[in-house]
């Protein structure tokens, strides 16, 4: 069934949600407060890089199912569903800041048609559905929680082929209507109360962050005892209870969600009287991981980072995105710079950075360097010519924080190679 959907906020989540709902056949109006952003979006110019999204936005603008307008009220005045997709930044105390969410709800409160459903897509603390209900103060409008589980880099397929769709509502008919929006997708629909839906989002991200910190801690043990973490993961991953996913060791987790959501979950727990020590440990391991990567470079260059020249491949927080938010690559490079190293970086999606010298060619940044550190798992790095890299580097040292390169090939080519956990 074709529904009229307003999307409030055209950030990463809003834009993907709006474009994909249009792709599923709904009529979508996306709103933002930034007129310039709306003007550009209306021409099909996206503010973010996300595989597959550009094509869908262009096709759906063309089909007439996707429009962009300035102002939440303008979008919501004729909708059946209003999706709140505004940012919920981390506040001073670690809790999510709901200012934008409340402002968006207040703006649409007076224009929402009778029996509209307001849907919280933003990641919000437990209890926020109730907060939105209070701000709206509309007894004919239901508020539903429908958290997103979109990964940058595969957000479009995550939306169109979800593992599950979580819908939290005290109003069964509103939940059923939101569920219908997804009828063209194949995901399991889980209908629950709002508090559980909100908790599911935090618990999912906290668990995923825990898996990564766990494997990074195991990697440290592997290094100490002479085991190979890749084989350990292979060995444990075939146990169906464990699985292989999210057990890739690396420089630590980052991005716009995990750091913010783990801190928010600890705060939610603390406010409710539970001390989430497990999650605290997960964060500590993550911070240590960055230090461990810096120490590897320090070892590679002979113990003194001051004056050492380091080539860095990768700046984004992971591959297939242009997002630098809470990037472990940036954290590691910043620490190298703080310790006096001279760093030249290359990233296929980043051409400049206020604090980092960014080059435009992966080989050029290697010229004369004392070590190369691989920080993001861009596929193209795998296929670069190691002999050429060796010719360019001053000293043949590789620190591969993603275990991305072919270790044997690197050693054969004459490099001193340090990976993670092996
Ligand atoms: C995450 C969640 O996956 C998504 O469901 C949620 O809604 C938003 O947050 P995203 O931030 O796009 O998505 O990135 P994700 O692919 O989950 O990776 C997060 C971080 O963990 C990255 O820094 C990544 O490099 C790291 N990671 C991931 C690892 O180090 N090892 C892994 O095995 C997986």
Image: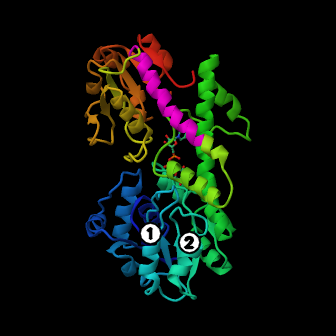
Task: Please rate how many residues cluster around mark 1, counting C-alpha atoms within 10 Å: few if below 14, some from 14 to 19, many from 20.
Answer: few
Element marked by disc 2: helix
Which region shows up in magenta?
A: 282-302
274 and 68: which one is in front? Answer: 274
Element marked by disc 1: helix
The quarter of the displayed image where residue 363 is located: top left
Quadrant position of the C terminus in the picture: top right
Mark 1 = which residue?
99
Mark 2 = which residue?
181
Vertical comparison of 401 with 82: above or below = above
191 and 28: which one is in front? Answer: 191
| Callout 1 touching callout 2 (CB < 8 Å) | no
25 and 413: which one is in front? Answer: 413
Which residue is rendered at x = 48% and y = 30% of the image?
291
The quarter of the displayed image where residue 33 is located: bottom left
Whether residue 187 is visible to the viewer of this picture, yes or no, is no
- Give residue 405's position: percent from left, percent from top: 46, 25
Indicate which label's residue lies in the foreground, 1 or 2.
1
């Amino acid at each position: 069934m074709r529904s009229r959907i307003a999307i409030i906020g055209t950030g990463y989540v809003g834009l993907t949600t709006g474009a994909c709902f249009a792709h599923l056949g709904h009529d979508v109006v996306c709103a933002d407060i930034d007129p310039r952003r709306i003007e550009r979006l209306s021409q099909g110019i996206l503010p973010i890089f996300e595989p597959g999204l550009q094509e869908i936005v262009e096709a759906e603008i063309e089909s007439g199912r996707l429009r962009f307008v300035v102002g939440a009220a303008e979008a919501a005045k004729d909708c059946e569903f209003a999706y709140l997709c505004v940012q919920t930044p981390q506040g001073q105390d670690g809790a999510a800041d709901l200012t934008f969410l409340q402002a968006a709800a207040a703006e649409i409160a007076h224009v929402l048609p009778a029996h509209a459903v307001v849907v919280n897509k933003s990641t919000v603390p437990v209890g926020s559905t109730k907060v939105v209900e209070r701000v709206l103060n509309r007894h004919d409008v239901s508020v539903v929680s429908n958290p997103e589980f979109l990964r940058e880099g595969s957000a479009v397929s995550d939306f169109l082929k979800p593992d599950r769709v979580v819908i939290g509502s005290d109003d069964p008919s509103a939940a059923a209507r939101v569920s219908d929006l997804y009828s063209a997708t194949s995901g399991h629909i889980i209908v629950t109360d709002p508090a559980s839906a909100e908790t599911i989002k935090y618990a999912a991200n906290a668990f995923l962050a825990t898996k990564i910190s766990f494997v990074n801690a195991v990697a440290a043990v592997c290094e100490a005892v002479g085991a190979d973490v890749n084989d350990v993961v292979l060995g444990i991953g075939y146990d169906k209870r464990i699985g292989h996913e999210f057990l890739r060791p690396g420089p630590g987790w980052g991005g716009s969600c995990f750091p913010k959501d783990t801190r928010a979950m600890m705060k939610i727990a603390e406010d409710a009287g539970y001390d989430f020590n497990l999650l605290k440990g997960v964060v500590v391991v993550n911070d240590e991981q960055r230090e461990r990567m810096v120490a590897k470079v320090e070892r590679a260059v002979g113990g003194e980072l001051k004056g050492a020249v380091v080539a860095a491949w990768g700046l984004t927080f992971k591959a297939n995105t242009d997002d630098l938010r809470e990037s472990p690559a940036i954290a590691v490079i910043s620490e190298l710079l703080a310790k006096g190293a001279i760093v030249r970086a290359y990233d296929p999606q980043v051409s400049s950075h206020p604090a980092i010298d960014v080059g435009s060619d992966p080989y050029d940044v290697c010229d004369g360097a004392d070590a190369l550190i691989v920080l993001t798992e861009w596929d193209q790095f795998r296929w670069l010519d190691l002999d050429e890299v060796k010719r360019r580097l001053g000293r043949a040292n590789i620190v591969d924080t993603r275990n991305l390169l072919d270790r044997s090939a690197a050693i054969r080519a004459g490099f001193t190679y340090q990976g993670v956990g092996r």
